[in-house]
């Protein structure tokens, strides 16, 4: 059996691969090593990131390239932007995507716009790795899913991997990319294992992946919701309904063709996005298909999202917040005339 | 605390004349933009640097193309002092295709990365983290370069002031933070908006040198900047210099400046004027003759007139430029 490693280890490997190949790649963020300047730790890291994703990197690359920062996001994210503009290839870790509130200017007004404002006379090869997602009992300020916000900003690319192998290949692509990429890591995926190739490989940003083929309906799902969609698809298959699960893998650029092609084949579309329901990736993809694929559709486009509320703390409530296979089946039953679907 | 004393290098006549030329270029350029703006030829809005020339020139006279600067919304002076082309700048302000940024940036975003000019910046306080990152980059790539962050008194109350300077200090980066305290953040007095008596006092909190100089005394700025730049190049870390200055025009063009008194304006346009004072310094120290300075004045007048002509005759950007330069490479649909 091929090698299986976790989503977290796949990300760690991607960083290692690129740092070995290019000395201009540096990693900076809060506690990415941890324990800086402590004599008793020496070259050891205290944490290797709050979730241990970057564990061991400081031992190999040293504290000049694995830079612990103050807890001051505007300071280090802004520094990463201009380091990128002046010849470095930084990876800045924004521990939780919720903290964008402290450094949105550096991303939205500086990093995303410098190239355009300078008439193309600058490039910003910067990756912002950030953790997102509910289901970790982390409450409203550490659980959001904000990729829609970044997708709306020209000058930013947005990548949301759903598997360990995708995470590694896409992160290597992101680090080697000459544009600013915000790379979303779902905190509940870190321990999920999957087959991951050894060594250096890339997956192009802007290319969707069909995670399951099917002819009866299309489910476009983002990030860990790909797993929710696959679980729903398995249950539908028991009823003889074959769902195609499309994983866009990046929201900007968006592989419009793959989505439209799938809808052309299946004539039905459900979009699963755990972000809040307004102005999110689901509404964006829905608008795309309504505009360019209306004639393919035999039924209304349906969306399964979080409600228009912050992420609650109580497990009883948080479990209600997230999309589930059952919620997907409920909307599918509105698209396909088969009452037994919801009672699977 | 004062920036460490280093051996002051005597100002050569050649350098002195270059500085005078740059100061006159800034003044003439800004006076010209002021005049032209009132005719409605220039789109949008502009913030003029006239009056503060001693700061940009006194500092940039110690820099070369490998050194970086970050600037502010009031950036024309920094651009000129850092060597940006006058024609390209003027065309940019007109929104023309021949502008330094192809007309996509305008007055508030003029940049020339090849000269180390990392852009004027429309966001107050935007420069602190950027300068810190440029300093980090110079240090890691071992270029020997430094980064200078020009910022106004308004920005000294912004959160990024704290984050940027603290980070430069803990990493001992080659960054010089240059405050241009012109007395007013927009229309609000410095004394009202800042809890400190001087911006330089805040350096103590970061354990870095900070000093206040007369920002309209070119030599005072020159000497303070020399100490700070040398310190940075020697790997001794960042410094903060507060230059107390004055802007001759309003916050933006069209500002009636009711917050200023006519006495202070008169004083600053005459006996306190940086160019008049530097001119006298050059003459009394035999660094330049009347004839030489007169000829610089005339050449600059012509150069600015040429820049205006160039901008006026240049074409507007073509429609296809609307969506280029957003990304280096963007392939919606995953096409190879």
Image: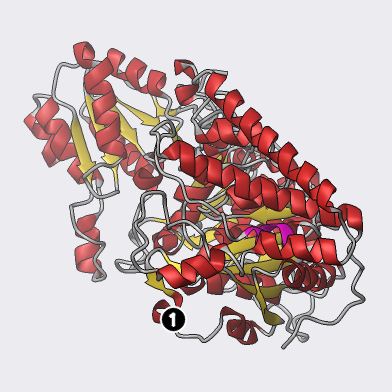
Task: State whether the magenta stretch is mostly helix, strand or loop.
Answer: helix
As displayed, is residue A296 above or below residue A217? above
Residue bounds of the magenta highlight: B53-58
The secondary element bearing badge 1 is classed as helix
For label 1, the residue is B191
Q: Answer with the quarter of the image where residue A132 lies.
A: bottom left
As displayed, is residue B331 above or below residue B269? above
Q: For this view, does B198 lie left or right of residue A324?
A: right
Q: Which residue is the extreme one toward the front?
A: B290
Q: Where is residue A145 drawn, in percent x and y?
A: 35, 52
Residue lying at 50% horizontally and 23% vertically, measured from the top left: B334
Q: From this viewpoint, is residue A119 visible?
A: no
Instruction: Name the image quarter holding the N terminus of chain B.
Output: bottom right
Q: Where is residue B323 drawn, in percent x and y?
A: 46, 25
Q: From this viewpoint, is residue B5 visible?
A: yes
Residue B255 is inside the magenta segment: no
Chain of the residue under label 1: B
Q: Residues within 10 Å of mark 1 (few under 14, many from 20)?
A: few
Q: For this view, does A192 lie left or right of residue A233?
A: right
Q: How is the image coloured?
A: secondary structure
Residue lying at 89% horizontally and 52% vertically, measured from the top left: B14
Q: Answer with the quarter of the image where residue A300 lies.
A: top left
Q: Depth check: A171 or B26 in front? A: B26
């Amino acid at each position: 059996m091929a090698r299986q490693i976790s989503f977290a280890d796949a990300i760690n490997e991607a960083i290692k691969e690129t740092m070995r190949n290019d000395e201009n790649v540096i990693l900076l963020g809060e506690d990415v090593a941890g324990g800086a300047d402590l004599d008793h730790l020496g070259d050891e890291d205290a944490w290797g990131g709050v979730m241990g994703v970057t564990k061991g990197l400081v031992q190999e690359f040293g504290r000049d390239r694995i830079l612990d920062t103050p807890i001051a996001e505007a300071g280090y994210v802004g520094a990463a932007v201009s380091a990128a503009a002046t010849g470095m290839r930084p990876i800045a870790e924004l521990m939780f995507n919720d903290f964008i509130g402290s450094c949105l200017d550096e991303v939205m007004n500086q990093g995303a716009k410098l190239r355009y404002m300078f008439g193309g006379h600058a490039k910003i090869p910067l990756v912002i790795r950030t953790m997102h997602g509910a289901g970790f009992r982390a409450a409203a300020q550490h659980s959001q899913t904000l990729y829609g916000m970044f997708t709306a900003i020209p000058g930013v690319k947005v990548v949301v991997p759903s598997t360990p192998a995708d995470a590694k290949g896409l992160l290597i692509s992101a680090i080697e990319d000459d544009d600013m990429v915000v790379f979303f890591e779902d905190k509940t995926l870190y321990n999920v294992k999957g087959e991951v190739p050894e060594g250096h490989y890339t997956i192009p940003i802007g290319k969707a992946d069909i995670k399951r083929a099917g002819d009866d309906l299309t489910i476009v799902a983002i990030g860990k919701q790909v797993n929710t969609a696959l679980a729903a698809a398995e249950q539908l298959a028991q009823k003889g309904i074959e769902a195609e699960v499309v994983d866009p893998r990046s929201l900007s650029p968006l592989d419009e063709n793959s989505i439209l092609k799938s809808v052309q084949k299946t004539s039905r579309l459900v979009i699963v996005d755990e972000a809040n329901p307004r102005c999110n990736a689901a509404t964006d993809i829905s608008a795309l298909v309504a505009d360019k694929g209306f004639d393919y559709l035999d039924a209304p486009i349906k969306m399964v999202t979080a409600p228009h509320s912050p992420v609650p703390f109580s497990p009883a409530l948080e479990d209600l917040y997230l999309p589930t296979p059952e919620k997907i089946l409920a909307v599918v039953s509105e698209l396909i005339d088969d009452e037994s679907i919801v009672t699977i | 605390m004062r920036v460490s004393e280093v051996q002051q290098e005597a100002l050569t006549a050649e350098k002195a004349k270059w500085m005078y030329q740059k100061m006159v270029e800034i003044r003439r350029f800004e006076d010209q933009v002021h005049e032209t703006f009132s005719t409605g030829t220039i789109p949008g809005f502009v913030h003029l640097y006239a009056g503060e020339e001693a700061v940009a020139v006194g500092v940039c006279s110690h820099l070369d193309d490998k050194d970086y600067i970050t600037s502010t919304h009031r950036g024309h002076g920094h651009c000129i002092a850092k060597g940006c082309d006058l024609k390209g700048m003027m065309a940019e302000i007109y929104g023309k295709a021949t502008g330094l940024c192809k007309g996509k940036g305008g007055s508030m975003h003029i940049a020339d990365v090849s000269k180390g000019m990392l852009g004027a910046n429309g966001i107050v306080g935007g420069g602190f983290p950027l300068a810190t990152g440029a300093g980090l980059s110079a240090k890691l790539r071992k270029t020997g370069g430094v980064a200078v962050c020009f910022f106004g008194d308004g920005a000294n109350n912004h959160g990024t002031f704290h984050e940027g300077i603290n980070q430069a200090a803990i990493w001992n980066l080659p960054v010089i933070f240059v405050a241009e305290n012109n007395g007013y953040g927009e229309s609000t007095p410095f004394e009202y908006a800042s809890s400190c008596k001087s911006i330089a006092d805040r350096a103590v909190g970061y354990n870095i040198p900070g000093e206040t100089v007369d920002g309209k005394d070119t030599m005072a700025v020159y000497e303070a900047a020399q100490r700070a730049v040398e310190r940075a190049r020697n790997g001794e870390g960042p410094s903060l210099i507060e230059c107390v200055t004055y802007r001759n025009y309003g916050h933006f063009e069209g500002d009636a400046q009711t917050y200023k008194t006519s006495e202070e304006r008169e004083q600053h346009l005459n006996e306190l004027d940086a160019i008049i004072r530097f001119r006298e310094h050059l003459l009394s120290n035999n660094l330049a003759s009347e004839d030489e300075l007169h000829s610089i004045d005339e050449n600059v007048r012509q150069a600015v007139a040429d820049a205006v002509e160039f901008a006026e005759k240049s074409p507007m950007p073509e429609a296809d430029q609307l969506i280029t330069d957003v990304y280096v490479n963007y392939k919606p649909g995953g096409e190879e």
